[in-house]
Amino acid sequence: MREMYKNMGICDEVYDYCDNIIKSLHDRFEEIDKNAEYNQMKVIKAMQDNKVAEMHLSGTTGYGYNDDGRDTLEKIYSDIFKTEDALVRPQIICGTHALNVALSSNLRPGDELLSPVGKPYDTMDEIIGIRPSKGSLAEYGITYAQVDLLPDGGFDYEGIKNAINERTKLVTIQRSKGYASRPTLSVERIGELISFIKDIKPDVICMVDNCYGEFVERIEPSEVGADMIVGSLIKNPGGGLAPCGGYIAGKKECVEQAAYRLSSPGLGKEVGATLGVNQSFYQGLFLSPVVVAGALKGAIFAANVYEKAGFVVRPDGSEPRYDIIQAVELGSADGLLAFCKGIQAAAPVDSFVTPEPWPMPGYDSDVIMAAGAFVQGSSIELSADGPLKEPYSVFFQGGLTWYHAKLGIMMSVQKMFEKDLIKL
Ligand SMILES: *Cc1c(COP(=O)(O)O)cnc(C)c1O
């Protein structure tokens, strides 16, 4: 094994350092494997109950009428997430698009949207109109209110109670911390928050941005009261095989609204050709629990590797996990660059490419990104990025197999070690 890693460019010091850390993670990895097993059964059961057959794996063209593969997959998502209905479509471009469809279809002029967990993911700014943008909810007369988390990460129940008014129609709760520094919410905590909100206003729609959270735990937010959960298929539930797509699962009424918005009033869920993607949607969902487990192991391994070397890591090496994202404060631009070069060098695709920092729209500093993915921008595949500013944090996630995630992290350590940026 050591020779194999040496062939990949990993020296003895890095190999031994990482090997020792892996030995200490045995129990945690076992727990992750148990969750994957549990979720794998959930997925297989749903596929069996819905009598998935070979014909479901092919697709339709044109209008996409009577696409049994598509309709059955949506039933499977509903079963897994324990919802009344689901919209799972290649026409949903990404997570941002899914969130936009869910919000803009279920809100009407005069309504108010509330985020009780602080500022949502960056790409939501322009959907909501936090930053003025063409076509935002704000342009349609939908207002926005926000209640930040308390300094200790707790919910500001008093503030939330005060913020809920007769116009509050929809509450958006982001499960993952995304690229913020707050902790990720467990499904249990999301349930507590939803109960509190529904006690005050029972008819409010509670939506959860479920990106990066699917199959990390044994239950999903839709099992603790969420009316709608929303996510991307080039993250967890696509299992790395879905080439595009997103989902909205939840109450029949909410999903129906979303379908009429995604296609057209009058058309709804009845149309939408799947072309050739059904097979990868099914197979990706089937693999997803195990893929997510590999990504989680990678995140925990990285947290421990960098924590023991003296870096600040979020979550820390021993905290429970509620999403697949790991942040490491590398403390210097050189560290951030070396880390990303390591991730890139370990990729199956574009391993020979050197990532460079670059100005990006919406960011006030250059950003460096590393990814060598089979699907463009897929972040269930091993990927890392970070803005070139204090504290030079890298955010990384994914890995279609645990061994690839492991190599990526070892390679990041190797690049840092070669530049004398890490002490082992
Ligand atoms: C990734 C992500 C999004 C947006 O998804 P895209 O597919 O990148 O558009 C929204 N919210 C959260 C929490 C995310 O992680």
Image (cartoon, rainbow, N blue to C red):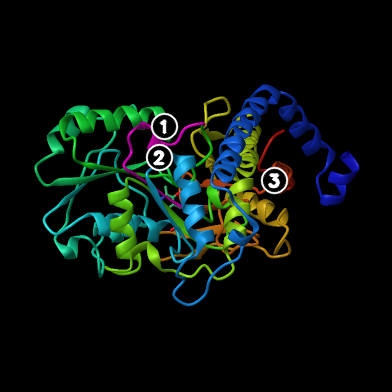
Q: Residues within 10 Å of mark 2 (few under 14, many from 20)?
A: many
Residue 387 lies, with reference to residue 417, above or below; the image says below
Q: Mark number for residue 175?
A: 2
Residue 415, image x, y percentages = 71, 49
Residue 94 lies, with reference to residue 76, above or below; the image says below
Residue 253 forms part of the magenta stretch: no
Residue 145, image x, y percentages = 19, 46
- CA separation in Å, label 2 and label 3: 24 Å
User: Could you tell whether 63 is left or right of 216 in the image?
Assistant: left
Give the amino acid at mark 1: Val
The residue located at (28%, 55%) in the rendering is 103
Residue 182 visible at all: no
Secondary structure found at label 3 = loop
Q: Mark number for residue 401?
A: 3
Name the foreground residue: 210 vs 13.
Answer: 210
Q: What residue range appears in magenta?
A: 218-232
**Is ligand 1 less than 8 Å from the beta carbon at label 2?**
yes
- CA separation in Å, label 1 and label 3: 25 Å
Q: Mark number for residue 242?
A: none
Q: Are marks 2 and 3 in contact (CB under 8 Å)?
A: no
Q: Earlier in the sequence, mark 2 or mark 1?
A: 2
Give the amino acid at mark 2: Arg
Residue that carries the numbered disc 1 in the rendered image: 187
Q: Earlier in the sequence, mark 2 or mark 3?
A: 2
Residue 37 lies, with reference to residue 405, above or below; the image says above
Q: Are marks 2 and 1 in contact (CB under 8 Å)?
A: yes
